[in-house]
Image: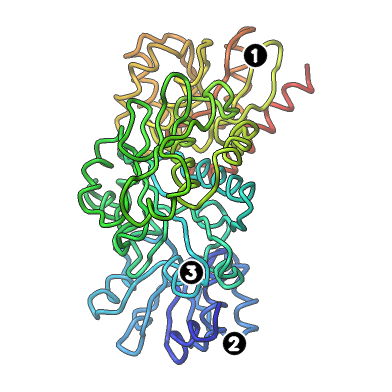
Amino acid sequence: MSIEKGKKYSGKKIVILGLAKSGAAVAKLVQRCGAEVIVNDKKSREESPEAAELEKLGITVICGEHPEDLINQTIDLVIKNPGIPYSILPVEKAISLGIPVVTEIEIAYELSDAPIIGITGSNGKTTTTTLVGEILHNGGLSPVVAGNIGTVLSEQAVSVKSDQILVAELSSFQLKGTRAFHPAIACLLNVYDAHLDYHKTKEDYIHSKMKLFANQCPEDVAVLNYDNNVCRMASRQIKSTLLWFSLGEPVEQGSYIDNGFVMWKRPEAGSLAERMAHTPLIEKIIAVDDIALPGSHNLENVLASVCIAKAAGVDAEKIAGILRTFTGVEHRLEFVTEVEGVKYYNDSKATNPEAATRALRAFSAPIVLIAGGLDRGIDFKELVPVFSERVKGIIVYGQTAEKLSARAREAGINNIKCVDTVTDAVAAAHLMAQAGDIVLLSPACASWDMYKSFEERGSMFKQSVHKLKTSR
C-alpha cells in the first residue's frame, strides 16, 4: 500500500458494522490510514473477542446493540460485514443520509498496489480461485489468494506488491457493497438461484454479481460461461474484452472442449490480442482424461481457469502441469476415506440445489445422500430427476428435512431417514450403504441453522467418518 493511497481515509470518520475477521482487519487498516474509527456489532461483548484488541489501539467498539445515534451526518463512510442485511437500521439510515455503504473489498481495491483478478459465481468460486492461484504460481507469477476463500482481502491488499497479483474469490454479498472496485480480470462462472433470502429478488442477486464488471474498460478482461443463459445475457453490459468458456461448443475466443482436449483460442483483435500476438491462435492445453480434478462441473472450473491464466500470460505447458496434479480443495467433492467398500465424500460447500446436482452427477455408483440445513424458502423440485437417477437412499436433517424427504418420495426413493445431526447421518448412512456405494454429504442448503459454517459441517462429517473407520 502506498502512503498516497492511504491518505484517502485520513481524517475521515468511519463506522465499521460487524466484527469477526474482516471487520477487525479493515478497522485496523483504515485507522492506520488516519481515520477515526467506530466499530459496532450487535453481538454481545462476550461473543466479540476482537473488541479488546481494537480498543487497545484506540478504536471505539460498541457491542450488544445498534445505537440510534450511531449513524449521523458527521459519518463519512460505513463499511459493513458482507453478511449484514441492508434492512438493519444503521444501514438504512446511512443510505437515507447519502453516506456510502461499502464492504471491505472496496477498501482492498482502493489501497492495493497490485492488479486484481476477481472470481464470482453461484458455484465453483473456491475451486476456481484456488486453481488459478496454483497455475499462476507455476507460471512464475506471484499470486496472493484471498477474499471469500477465507483470507481477508483488505488485509492482503496492504502488503501485496505492484508486481504481484491479488486473486480474489468474491461473493454477491461482497460485490453488492462496491462502488469503484475494478479488477483487471473478472470471471463470472455461473448464476443460479441462490441467496434469495438476502437479495430478495433474483434481479438484485444478478445485479450484485455484475458489479464485478461495472468499472472495467476495453483493456480489461471478462471471462464468462457461454453455457449459462444469465452469463450470455449479462455479457451485453460488459465493456471489457470477452473470453468465453464452454463445455458444449467451440467459442469465438476462450476455452472449450474438442475431441477430448481442452483447447484455447486467443482473440484476433483488440488489446489482449496485441499482448498475445507472439502465441499461436489455437492451442491444445491438455487431454480431458489427464485432468486430476473429478466431475464435469469441475471441468467448467478448469476451462474458466485456462481463460484467466492465459489472459494473465501463463503458457499452456505451465497450465497443464497444474491440471495434471490439482485434485481439489477441502469440502468440495473431497474424498474422505473408504470403509468396508463404501467411499465417503465431503461436499459440504454444496449450499444450493444446483451444487448438489453437480455433485450427484459426478458419480456413476449408487449414492446414499446426506442433505439438509437452513430453510431459505427453496422448494428443491429441481432435485427430483437427479434423485431418481442417482440416489438409492437419503439421510436428511435440519430445517429442510421434511422438504427434502418429500422430494425424495416424489423421486421414488423409499429408503429415507431423518436424523438430528451430521454425526447421526454418518451412522445412518453406514447402515444404509453397501460395498460399492458412495456416501455423499452434499447438503443443498446453507449450514447456519445448526453449524457456524459449511467448513464446520464438513469437518464434523469427516471426523465422524474417520471414527466409523477406526471403530470397525
What residue does disc 2 label?
58
Tell me the kind of residue under disc 1: Val
Per the model, the C-alpha gap separating discs 2 and 3 is 22 Å
User: How much space separates mark 3 and mark 1, taking CA atoms?
Assistant: 45 Å
- Tell me the quadrant of the picture where the C terminus can be found: top right
x and y percentages locating residue 435 in the rendered image:
64, 7
Q: Which colour scheme is used?
A: rainbow
For the residues marked 2 and 1, what is the alpha-carbon distance in whole angstroms? Answer: 56 Å
Residue at (32, 66) in percent of width and height: 88
Which residue matches tag 3?
Answer: 108
Residue pushed farthest bottom? 11
Sequence order check: which comes first, mark 2 or mark 1? 2
The image quadrant that residue 181 belongs to is bottom left
Tell me which numbered mark, 3 or 1, is placed earlier along the sequence.
3
Q: Do the residues labelled 2 and 3 touch (CB within 8 Å)?
A: no
Q: Can residue 373 be seen in this view?
A: no
Choose the circle earlier in sequence order: 2 or 3. 2
Other residues around mark 3 within 10 Å, as few (<14) / some (14–19) / many (≥20): many
Residue with the mark numbered 1: 342
Q: Considering only vertical position in the picture, is 79 above or below 442?
A: below
Mark 3 is on which residue type?
Ala
The location of residue 208, given as percent across then percent down, is: 30, 55
- Could you tell me if residue 272 is visible in this image? yes
